Amino acid sequence: MANMCPNKVPMPVQDAKVRNGNFKEVALGYTEEMAMEEATRCLNCKNRPCVSGCPVNVQIPEFIEKVAAGDFEGAFEKIKENNALPAICGRVCPQENQCEKQCVRGIKGESVGIGRLERFVADWHMQNGKNQPFKAEPNGHRIAVVGSGPSSLSCAGSLAKKGYDVTILEAFHVAGGVLMYGIPEFRLPKAIVQKEIDALREMGVTIETNMVVGKIFSVDELLQDRYEAVFVGTGAGLPSFMKIEGENLNGVYSANEFLTRINLMKAYRFPEVDTPVVIGNSVAVVGGGNVAMDAARCAKRLGAENVYIVYRRSEEEMPARNEEIEHAAEEGIIFKLLTNPQRILGDEQGFVTGMECVEMELGEADASGRRRPVAKEGSEFVLDVETVVIAIGQTPNPLIKQTTPDLETQKWGGIVADENGKTSKEGVFAGGDAVTGAATVILAMGAGKKAAAAIDEYIQNK
């Protein structure tokens, strides 16, 4: 009999007043008993709508059935058939807009906690499972993967399973891309990311760091030298700014720099680690997405007394996950909604002293379907802050575009690729944020997986 409780088994979390002072993981994960109880809420539907909502097509009812029976290792093996990074996806995927959105249980209550169960299974395996990495028989073909974020890791893992000799070329000194530099430790512990990367190495994938493709090698040189195909998964690491007065004052960060210094360079451990981030007493984070929430919550943990989210629309239009917004509010983040920055103010030494803002109201819907914010006359005010973090979006780094002239790109910088990752240049495939612009980890992984299948077909036909 299915468990017909309308609500998910609650996820244990750190108390908000404790966690906003540390970088330990917020969500603590299910126990075995909790996981088995939640798994019994699955109806094991015949048409399996949840699977269609998963970008990598994890066989969700099958792995949940194994969890309900206490076969946690079997559940892990079932997930790994389609998902190369389950411990990561279980933590950062927006399941509420994907697999869980399609769950039948969500019609008259809460959907099954698919993401929570995926995380539990992956964590259980890391602690209890026997690591027996699959290493395929080499097929004699070499593939280069540029970047080491989620799309690249997914592509590399899929190709390695087929026997390809895969080399990942990463520009930073640590592999993992946005998983390492963009997502805070309290949402995604770096030790978990490292374990997933180590598993790829055990499958035979070579990872070379400090390799800036476009500087050390061009894509053309990779194809001419050692590799039969190249996958470009360089993400979207070029920050966007508002182009308002004062953005080059001391104390203004892009969210990309702010989070990279904190996450990858371990600024939260200063002075033990020599990477300071000076934030002052009050911080304004401009934006309403997950990156903005991450930056605000990091600033609070670094000791800022007042941390503001400044967003020009209402909470209803915020693109951030509901869970992120709720956690931020619980931790004391102050939301300045329907508020738009006009200019950043500074002193004679060039340091931020405040941000001039204007109140907004919502007008007609724009091209995105969201109501367009319009400034209220005479509503200007100054927000007293010492630090401003701009988190309004990112675009792909132009280096690959500039050094690969026959690679077709969009006007905004994204690489033009079909649904299988094939680009305008023979032998070159691309996926993830480098193609779509900033999106989710699981969508990037899905793109990497599709591109791996297309690369395999290309090599076989060639």
Image (cartoon, rainbow, N blue to C red):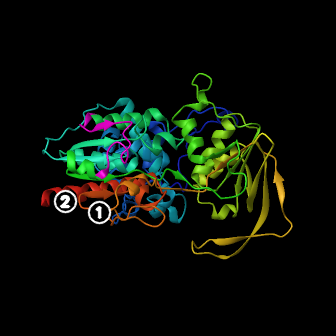
Q: Which residue is tagged 1? A: 422
Q: Main secondary structure of the magenta part?
A: loop
Quarter assignment of residue 312:
bottom right
Q: Tell me the quarter of the image containing the C terminus.
A: bottom left
Q: Confirm or deny contact between disc 2 and disc 1 (CB under 8 A).
A: yes
Q: Position of residue 49 (x, y in %)?
A: 39, 64
Residue closer to the observer: 76 or 132? 132
Q: Tell me the quarter of the image containing the N terminus.
A: bottom left
Quarter assignment of residue 454:
bottom left
| x 44%, y 43%: residue | 177
- The reply, left or right, for residue 269 in relation to residue 206 is right
- The reply, left or right, for residue 283 in relation to residue 104 is right
Asked if residue 351 is positioned above or below residue 238 in the image, the reply reads: above
Q: Position of residue 256 (x, y in %)?
A: 56, 46
Circle 1: residue type: Lys
Circle 2: residue type: Tyr
Stretch of the chain drawn in magenta: 202-219
Q: Which residue is tagged 2? A: 458
- The reply, left or right, for residue 346 in relation to residue 272 is right
| Callout 2 crowding tier (Cα within 10 Å): few <14, some 14–19, many ≥20 | some
| x 23%, y 44%: residue | 160
